[in-house]
Amino acid sequence: MAEVKVGIINVTGYIGMELARLLHRHPSVRLASITGRSAVGKGIGEVFPHLADINLTIEPELGQVDLAFAALPHGESAATVVAMLERGIKVVDISADFRLKDASEYRRWYKATHPALEHLKEAVYGLVELNRGQVAGARLVANPGCYPTGAILALAPVIKEGLIEPEIIVDSKSGVSGAGRALNLTTHYAEANENVYAYALDGHRHLPEMLQELRRLAPEPALSITFLPHLVPMTRGIFTSCYARLSGGEKSREDIVRLYQDFYRGETFVKVAVAPPQTKQTWGSNLCLIYPSVDIGTGTLIVVSCLDNLVKGGAGQAVQNMNLMLGFPEETGLEGLAVYP
Amino acid sequence: MAEVKVGIINVTGYIGMELARLLHRHPSVRLASITGRSAVGKGIGEVFPHLADINLTIEPELGQVDLAFAALPHGESAATVVAMLERGIKVVDISADFRLKDASEYRRWYKATHPALEHLKEAVYGLVELNRGQVAGARLVANPGCYPTGAILALAPVIKEGLIEPEIIVDSKSGVSGAGRALNLTTHYAEANENVYAYALDGHRHLPEMLQELRRLAPEPALSITFLPHLVPMTRGIFTSCYARLSGGEKSREDIVRLYQDFYRGETFVKVAVAPPQTKQTWGSNLCLIYPSVDIGTGTLIVVSCLDNLVKGGAGQAVQNMNLMLGFPEETGLEGLAVYP
Amino acid sequence: MAEVKVGIINVTGYIGMELARLLHRHPSVRLASITGRSAVGKGIGEVFPHLADINLTIEPELGQVDLAFAALPHGESAATVVAMLERGIKVVDISADFRLKDASEYRRWYKATHPALEHLKEAVYGLVELNRGQVAGARLVANPGCYPTGAILALAPVIKEGLIEPEIIVDSKSGVSGAGRALNLTTHYAEANENVYAYALDGHRHLPEMLQELRRLAPEPALSITFLPHLVPMTRGIFTSCYARLSGGEKSREDIVRLYQDFYRGETFVKVAVAPPQTKQTWGSNLCLIYPSVDIGTGTLIVVSCLDNLVKGGAGQAVQNMNLMLGFPEETGLEGLAVYP
Amino acid sequence: MAEVKVGIINVTGYIGMELARLLHRHPSVRLASITGRSAVGKGIGEVFPHLADINLTIEPELGQVDLAFAALPHGESAATVVAMLERGIKVVDISADFRLKDASEYRRWYKATHPALEHLKEAVYGLVELNRGQVAGARLVANPGCYPTGAILALAPVIKEGLIEPEIIVDSKSGVSGAGRALNLTTHYAEANENVYAYALDGHRHLPEMLQELRRLAPEPALSITFLPHLVPMTRGIFTSCYARLSGGEKSREDIVRLYQDFYRGETFVKVAVAPPQTKQTWGSNLCLIYPSVDIGTGTLIVVSCLDNLVKGGAGQAVQNMNLMLGFPEETGLEGLAVYP
């Protein structure tokens, strides 16, 4: 069998370097080419000593590969993605450029006209557990945002079954790496350490992703979400707490758990936890742990989820998408257990 | 003027030692006696080197003082508190023993018959901003729990005005010192570091405090709260995010902010923040920062609050209560600004 | 080929669970049996959710395996190790019981008569880079301590060449997981967070290991080491800074670097870094990064080293030893890159 | 008595804002004017919410004050300091511009000609415990660097008495706030968290300060220091470990401790700890804890010291200098105990 080659566009961000870590150990593909917005011409091991085993130079342009991961910022990504598609290269786009199907939503949240409307339709939202079939046949997959991954997976089962009232609260707590590698006072160590706060109180760009995917599942589209992200002092991990009133008669926690177990039965990377989960239990792995619960006193469903924002919320999910797009078993190269403690 | 003497019962917990720090610098009282559940007979500086300037020995029994802080665990506290009252000593009780007015609620949440029913009625819930007058005249004040302090202060203005639907979500993120100084695997460094999770999904003992105090304010008592506490990897700080539907017509953020400013006008320790606040801005101080907001898309009120769980959520609030009980200006000894970064 | 089976005695400590993580993904052995000092009868996934993919129950006694890892505390380990040897099972002992060749040193540092003198002689000190041949032929390997691994690897080249004066300073900074999973006030989160300090100022048990192995290399035995370990607020990682006067004429940093490169040429897990290394560059991997330098002003050699105390300083090194003992390529199952950031 | 007014030049760095915190509560001076390199025209509470109680606007130029703290970067500071002196304003200079008496050393370490040679001679190195008399009479005090404060205080007693060999190792571990508020990849949260490393292996600018002050104390000037600073993942604190051979006959730890106790007897801010100290015990306070020890096996003196780099290593020491320069008791406004945990 001819060797399958893959490349990373912009390896120098946190998702880019995590992709390099995962792909280096992937048994079925060869990481053959990498580019960077900085450090062009340097060996990757010079820039990132932990990747010194990867014998590649950061190039200005991607070499010929079968599939590329585009890890550029939104807005910048689309043009590069299109150029890849035109070269016959499949693409997993890490940016937000192809996630929203409705171009007016893109304009509203990203304050720009969509840069590649003609490809919006073919792009598949790469949340494998919901869109597995489409991903397998896609040549362009939009890798989900880190927050939507945790929130959608937590809510999908009850929304599909129409078990909750349509007003949902999603309260997420993210590690600081989610803010990326670009320097900013809010992610300066002395500012972020020993500190917790909410941000994006006027609305976060990941909200329309959640709405888009959950509305597709819902029997009726009246869904609304209040989403509030928080920064907590750790490097990796997102903990998402979802709240909604149960509708249509009492449900026990056991009923709900059974529903979740059925919904995610057979999934490798989404597990219904038997005890309240912790982000650390997913550290460095592609796992998303989900725990549904019922607040008896108020009839409120509480579903919490944990994941590593750079893996299931980023590079790991991207590799999971790649595996499907290239015909490999979904879990290939993603079998590593979480590193704990 | 005769010198006012105060004492700390069980100085060896985190609230106890924070009380010692604050009282040592208080200009109007003298910390005259301290006891401990451990380390009896040792100088406090031997046990806690940062308190070496305090020249006191940990005693088995409290000496004669005018007011005592009881920093014992719930259940254990009540008997000691009663003994102090009988000696004519005013008491600020840090434990939960006198917080709940309804003894059946105490039984339900603390799994025990209330240990001192006869004193329950006179105890004042020491959230000064709501109960200032009662505190000033009390001889027994129940110092509020750390979570209720942040949640009640965040919600009081809109509940008093009847501006929200009665179903409220309270999602709190606490630093690890809130779990106390007793050893536990969940607060073992390697377990708690780089980790976030929810706990007490079956109900947390601080919920009935929130309900009790907020129902007293509400025009109608139909209030319900779903409360979920989370542990985040930092030592001090609680960030609380409250969510509720606005009722009775549209309100702008400006309307709500004005309401909060009016409600807390003149308060030294509760401030309506002009930008989304951070727990670190309250670190080591008696400040509670509150920031109300409106999610326009869904008509949901979001109010967040920040405080230091060991100060406004513990020892600082206790000193604030003491000041009122002893007739000193409320802010005496609590003027220190937050230590940042 | 018949399958090779391995077991872990006491999987419930940090080294034990890290062994489980590594062995689960090892392509040439099967983790077949695990025991624990606690949690006997439970599935490992119940106790450690991140290990839920491992389908094993914690047993009271180890089943039949070809090689066992004994991850018991010192003193307790020896008897179990001997029992394994008698059952024909090879052993990598994580404890300190077989590290010191001189039983009087054992007595001095561990305050006990050596519990299995008759096996002391055959035990090989499992620092593969120095003792590769002996390890390959051993049936009992004593896995090195975490501090000695970093210090010995940092100093071996110059000591072997006799390039430094015999008085050496070793100043190590360790993450908190090195103190293990047993509860202790010093590793309570609120105590260890935002804190640095030295401990064992009266002498640390890892010192005689350093002396034993380095004296074996030295042309003359007059070597002395002042070793001071420090605790720093992170979970994993040891940074070791070694200081010694260069002897016998001026040496440039280039000369020294060349010596180190020659010494460690061909090693998979010890690398001479091209820039000052950081512990995070080894996080979760079996890598030890070494960086020698010369303080020109004083003629002092400075060599620093980084490793993950639970991998190269523990479970990873144990697997490296196992690989040699069982005839597998040394790096098998240890190829994972560091997880960064 | 006429009110004494003080000002802060560049309040927007970490030392500047810590000065504001301390001076706001100082009973004998009034913080009357502040300037900033950024945020001119804004109220300080807008920029730093934890300082909202301070009712001052950040000005482009300092108003009339009796004493100014110059918290500018080195090189930039000197011209401003001179301008203040010419206006008759006493100055505590936080920068390094006036610390080194030998202008050629300044040139060597700061790669620039000294910008104000004519004032170098009158500047007093503001380590109060060594230079108290000179500080009291000075109009220009150079506030010591954070590392030199911890190292000089740790070594002064034995160097003055000539008790150690002249080759000294100083290994320091600093929290990240020591690197300041300017953005840098090394202080980006995700990079600095869970990480330890040495830096400035080619020499650090704080070394000549240590040598200058310690050589002034030494009976013979042959002193040399190998100084290696390390970054550890915490916000505040410096832990310094000093190593040197004891000379001239055996000394017990008791002998050495007595020497240190005698040397620092009566000092408010330097204490000889009775047990190995921790940086956290000095958090937010002006305390420096020192603990001398002897490694019996090698005859090596080990002295460790702890301080808060922003207080005794910065703003607190600056206020201590100010107190002396203005004739106030040295401890005025610095009585706050460390905030622990």
Image (tube, coloured by chain):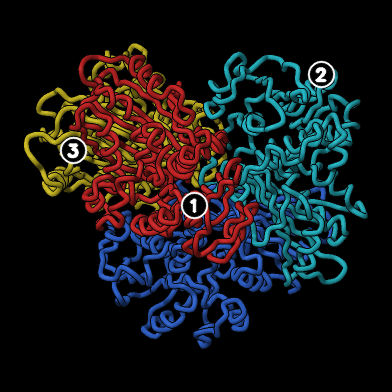
Chain colours: A red, B yellow, C cyan, D blue
Q: Are marks 3 and 2 in contact (CB under 8 Å)?
A: no
User: Distance from label 1 to label 2 (Cα)?
Assistant: 49 Å
Q: Secondary structure at mark 1?
A: helix
Looking at the image, can residue B29 be seen? no
Looking at the image, can residue A255 be seen? yes
The kind of residue tagged 2 is Ala
User: Distance from label 3 to label 2 (Cα)?
Assistant: 66 Å
Q: Secondary structure at mark 3?
A: strand
Callout 3 crowding tier (Cα within 10 Å): few <14, some 14–19, many ≥20:
many
* Residue marked by disc 1: A16
**Which quadrant holds the C terminus of chain A?**
top right
Q: Nearer the viewer, residue C330 or D7?
A: C330
User: Distance from label 1 to label 3 (Cα)?
Assistant: 37 Å
- Residue A83 image offset from top left, x and y in percent: 40, 58
Q: Residue furthest top?
A: B113
Left or right relative to D193: residue C199: right
Badge 3 sits on which subunit? B
Q: Secondary structure at mark 2?
A: helix
* Residue marked by disc 2: C83
At x 62%, y 65%, the residue is D200
Badge 2 sits on which subunit? C
* Residue marked by disc 3: B300
Left or right relative to A26: residue A264: left
Position of residue D261 relative to residue C98, above or below, is: below
The kind of residue tagged 1 is Gly
Badge 1 sits on which subunit? A
